[in-house]
Image (tube, rainbow, N blue to C red):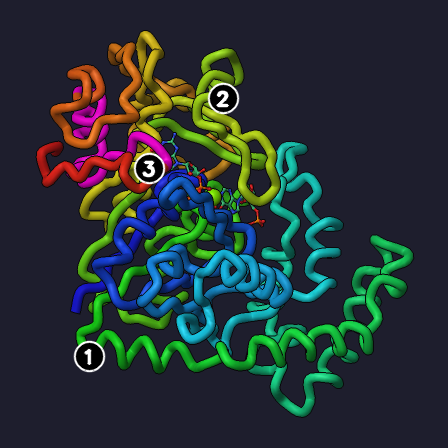
Amino acid sequence: MPVTCVIGLQWGDEAKGKLVDLLTEQHEIVVRYQGGSNAGHTVVRDGQTFKLSLIPSGILGQGVKCVVTGGVVLNPASILDEISGLESRGIKVAGNMLLSDRAHVIFPWHIIEDRLLDKSCSSGENIGTTMRGIGPCYRDKVGRSLAIRLGDLFRDDFRSRVAYIVEAKTKHLGGLEPNVAEQLDAEKIYGEYMGYAERLRPYVADTTAYLLDAVEAGKKLLLEGAQGALLDVDHGTFPFVTSSNSSGAGVSSGSGIPGRWITKAIGVVKAYSTRVGGGPFPTEQDNEIGQLICDRGNEYGTVTRRPRRCGWFDAVAARYTARLSGVDSLAVMLLDVLSTLPELKICTAYDIGGKRTKVFPSHVDDLRQAQPVYETIPGWKDEITTARKMDDLPQAARNYLVRISELMERPVQVVSVGPDRQQTIFTQGTIG
Ligand code: GDP
Ligand code: IMO
Ligand code: MG
């Protein structure tokens, strides 16, 4: 009964999609269990680039079942676009995917709220959300009284639910946006969502029951995390986080699969750090080094195309999230991006208010003050994108991986040296 989880350990975009695509062939079911269309996972297969957001990256493997669980917030228009985009490229989604009837649905009022409420939340800084209505939809889920789940779209009272919520939202938002009533027409929204519901009907199922049957029958499951553990709403850099549990802590609540079935968790890290949106980032390099990493790594957000902020590898943060997520081994991605840099730095501790610590701070203001303590490691000159085994890597690159493994107290199982599937080294436990 092997259930493997793939968890991003930084601020997202660690190349989880590539890893899930690589591991899919060893599994029967691939599960997406939190987040929504704030996620953007890019997978390169045989020179073709696929961008996935709500649909698990496992769909490209074909022959596996993909499941989107109740922990996800679902924008019906986005997933329908994604389905037709994949089908037009010969990827069969019909018959290969299930969507939970428990998944909460994103409505136009959530998008409006995201725009209106992403105002400065700490020290004058915005969260800088993806504006996909994620936070407002999760807020309504927890608030319960103004929430609609996918299964509700097929109930008799759906029309009256929409009318009731539109009235309430118009009142709530009227003070912030005077013309909100013009933007929220209950009948129009009802008609639009009935259209989506009909097209999504074949996919909708009780995925909790389906997954419980699957684990009890010993099926091989792969769970695909979205975002990164530092964006976890409870354990991340609050309030500069997303609105779900994106660390390993969210696996069971999001999927409905009890922790006792989870046999392996792989933590995915970039060989450096990136962050999109606001919030403290101790190892950020707002200088030519950061620019070089951004250019070499093509570090622009998949969803919003915003340039990602870039910096050195932060072993304090990544060790914290690896422990938090119960990670057994590591996948170190985008190592090739660091080639040509004469020397590399890894943050091994923080100085906060005159005290040195290896504990990741729980309050964002302490993190904001953290001065990274760096260890400097020699870089390597040559490009490494053609490396396929550890021996193909320069000694300096191997040393860098060994140091990451030591600081994170976990073996490196996978090293990625380019976006393509072939550009991957499985280390067979030789590092760490
Ligand atoms: P995810 O959100 O964690 O799935 O990551 P993204 O797909 O948003 O971002 C990772 C980006 O890096 C994508 O554009 C990938 O195609 C690309 N990528 C993945 N692995 C590598 C690698 O080893 N080297 C380079 N240069 N790019 C990679
Ligand atoms: P993947 O799955 C990187 C960031 C946003 C913002 C914060 C809150 O591709 O790794 P939200 O729209 O979720 O309310 O925004 O979280 N964010 C991500 N950053 N990768 C992601 O997903 C992200 N999903 C959300 O930029 O700072
Ligand atoms: Mg991404």
Which label belongs to residue 217?
A: 1
Nearer the N terminus, badge 1 or badge 3?
1
Residue 120, quarter of the rendered image: top right
The answer to whether residue 410 is seen in the rendering is no
Residue at image position (15%, 16%) is: 395
Could you tell me the amino acid type at mark 3?
Val
Vertical side of 132 occupied by 398: above or below: above
The residue range painted magenta reads 399-419
For residue 416: magenta? yes
**In this figure, which residue is indicated by the disc labeled 3?**
269
Instruction: Please give the name of the residue rendered at 48% of the width and 52% of the height, measured from the top-left corner.
Output: 52
Q: Amino acid at mark 2?
A: Asp
Q: Is residue 336 left or right of residue 131?
A: left
Going by the numbered disc 1, the residue's amino acid type is Ala
Task: Tell me if residue 322 comes above or below residue 213 in the rendering.
Answer: above
**Mark 1 and mark 3: Cα distance apart in space:** 32 Å
